[in-house]
Amino acid sequence: EARQHVVELLVPDFEALDVNLKELKQLAKDLAIPIILICQMGTDALRDMAKWPHRRPTQGDLLYAGTIERHADTIALVYRREYALRRNRPLESDAKFAEWKTEVLKEGGRAELILTKRRGGRGWGTAEMGFAPETVEFTDHPNRSQMATDDRGELQLGGGVQYHPALTGNA
């Protein structure tokens, strides 16, 4: 028995592709599906954002920005201030550590989706969203702060993220 699979969405990594973006766009039209192309930021942009956590990404920060801008119908960038803050963690003995910890708690579980290009010029801007880093899941609940804590409810400053039971409804 022959099985058919329906492709509804294609999400390739741009750096792993050896394909012309024009051809990829034609494939989307031929299959009548959206293609979300994942692309890295350039190293200069990453270095700048590490120094200045409030700096939001722009189209020009994308690796191969010119090619992507020319062919994309929509360009959306993700900004997570928590990520930038964690890259600039002060020593616990530093006077700024308490302020930094408060900011990380405030920004935990939040992301901004910045639409910088929409072919046709409508519907661009910034949307605040919730973000779960362990599943890379975006939600439409930016105010449902998902703090990174350990089992005792203390701020977890290490690698993995756990959600405070009161925030997940498991309290």
Image (cartoon, rainbow, N blue to C red):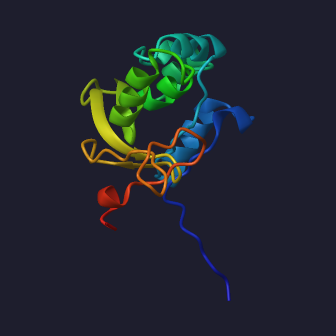
Q: Nearer the viewer, residue 114 or 69?
A: 114
Task: Report the front residue among 90 and 60.
Answer: 90
Q: Is residue 70 left or right of residue 171?
A: right
Which corner quadrant holds the C terminus? bottom left
Question: In this view of the protein, can residue 114 be seen by the observer?
Answer: yes
> Which residue: 51% across, 44% down?
35
Number of labels in the image equals 0
Q: Judge whether residue 17 can be spotted in this image.
A: no
Is residue 19 depicted above or below 85 in this figure? below
* Residue lying at 29% horizontally and 35% vertically, measured from the top left: 128
Residue 112's quadrant in the figure? top left
Q: Is residue 33 above or below residue 57?
A: below
| Residue 102 percent across, percent down from the top left | 36, 29
Q: Is residue 83 above or below residue 170?
A: above
Q: Quadrant of residue 163?
A: bottom left
Q: Position of residue 117 (x, y in %)?
A: 37, 24
**Residue at position x 57%, y 21% from top?**
91
On screen, residue 67 versus residue 32, left or right, reads right
Q: Residue furthest bottom?
A: 1
Q: Position of residue 41 (x, y in %)?
A: 59, 22
Relative image position of residue 40 (x, y in whole percent): 61, 28
Q: Residue at x 36, y 33 (%)?
A: 107
Side of 74 where 27 appears, left or right: right
Of 150 and 54, nearer the camera is 150
Of the 4 image quadrants, the one containing the N terminus is bottom right
